Image (cartoon, rainbow, N blue to C red):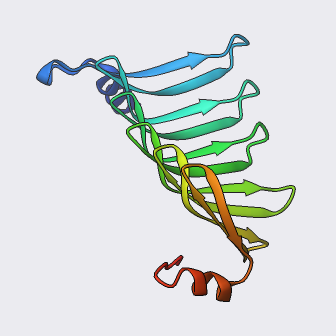
C-alpha cells in the first residue's frame, strides 16, 4: 500500500527536469460527475485523456500532444456504444476514420485529409462491402456498387 501511494505521489508531483510540470488533472460536470481526466504538462494537455458524458458513460478517449489531439481517438454515445474512431495529427482529422451506425448496421471507413473527407469511403453492411464513395474536400464525387466497376474506373487504387 505504501509503495502504491509513493508511486502515485511521484506521478503527480511537479517534475524539476527542464522546468516542466506534470500533473494528473480531473474536471467535473455541474452535476458532480467526472467530465474529463488526463495529464497536463506545462499547462497543456498531453498523453492519454478520457472524457465522460453527464451520465458517467465514457464519451471519448485518446492522446494529446502539445494541447492538440493526436494519434488514435475513440468516440462513444451516451449508452457507451462506439460511434466513430480515427486518427488525428496535430488536432486535424487525418487518414482513415471508421463510423458505426447501429440503426442501419452500416460501417463506413472514410479517408480524411485536413479535417475533410478526401478520398474513398467504403460502406459495409453486415461486414460485407456494399459500395464505395469518392470525396474530394468534403464534396461527394461519385459511387460504385460493384468491385468490378470500381476497379475498372480506378485501376491503380488498392482499397485493402
Looking at the picture, how far across and down is residue 158, in whole percent?
49, 79
Using the image, determine if residue 68 lies above or below residue 141.
Answer: above
In the displayed structure, would residue 60 be above or below residue 26? below
The picture quadrant where one finds residue 79 is top right
Question: 23 and 1: which one is in front?
Answer: 23
Point 73% across, 12% down: residue: 31
How many callouts does the rendering have?
Answer: 0
**Residue 20, position as x, y percentages in the image:** 21, 20
> Residue drawn at (66%, 89%), measured in percent from left and top?
148
* Residue lying farthest to the left in this orientation: 18
From the viewer's side, name the closer residue of 83 and 39.
83
Residue 139 x/y as whole percent: 62, 51
Q: Is the residue 140 above or below the residue 152 in the image? A: above
Apparent side of residue 101 relative to residue 9 in the rendered image (left or right): right
> Residue sitting at 66 percent across and 16 percent down?
29
Identify the residue at the far top of this view.
30
In the rendered image, the vertical position of residue 148 relative to residue 58, given as above or below = below
Which sits in the foreground, 140 or 122?
140
Left or right of residue 24: residue 34? right
Name the spot of residue 143 as percent of width and height, x first.
70, 69
Quadrant (top left, top right, bottom left, bottom right) of the N terminus: top left
Amino acid at each position: 500500500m505504501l509503495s502504491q501511494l509513493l508511486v502515485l505521489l511521484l506521478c503527480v508531483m511537479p517534475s524539476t527536469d527542464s522546468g516542466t510540470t506534470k500533473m494528473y488533472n480531473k474536471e467535473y460536470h455541474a452535476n458532480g460527475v467526472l467530465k474529463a481526466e488526463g495529464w497536463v504538462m506545462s499547462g497543456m494537455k498531453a498523453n492519454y485523456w478520457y472524457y465522460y458524458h453527464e451520465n458517467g458513460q465514457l464519451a471519448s478517449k485518446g492522446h494529446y500532444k502539445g494541447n492538440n489531439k493526436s494519434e488514435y481517438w475513440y468516440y462513444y454515445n451516451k449508452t457507451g456504444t462506439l460511434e466513430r474512431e480515427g486518427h488525428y495529427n496535430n488536432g486535424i482529422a487525418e487518414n482513415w476514420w471508421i463510423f458505426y451506425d447501429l440503426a442501419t448496421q452500416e460501417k463506413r471507413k472514410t479517408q480524411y485529409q485536413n479535417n475533410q473527407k478526401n478520398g474513398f469511403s467504403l460502406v459495409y453492411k453486415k461486414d460485407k462491402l456494399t459500395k464505395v464513395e469518392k470525396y474530394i474536400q468534403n464534396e461527394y464525387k461519385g459511387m460504385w456498387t460493384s468491385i468490378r466497376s470500381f476497379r475498372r474506373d480506378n485501376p491503380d487504387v488498392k482499397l485493402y
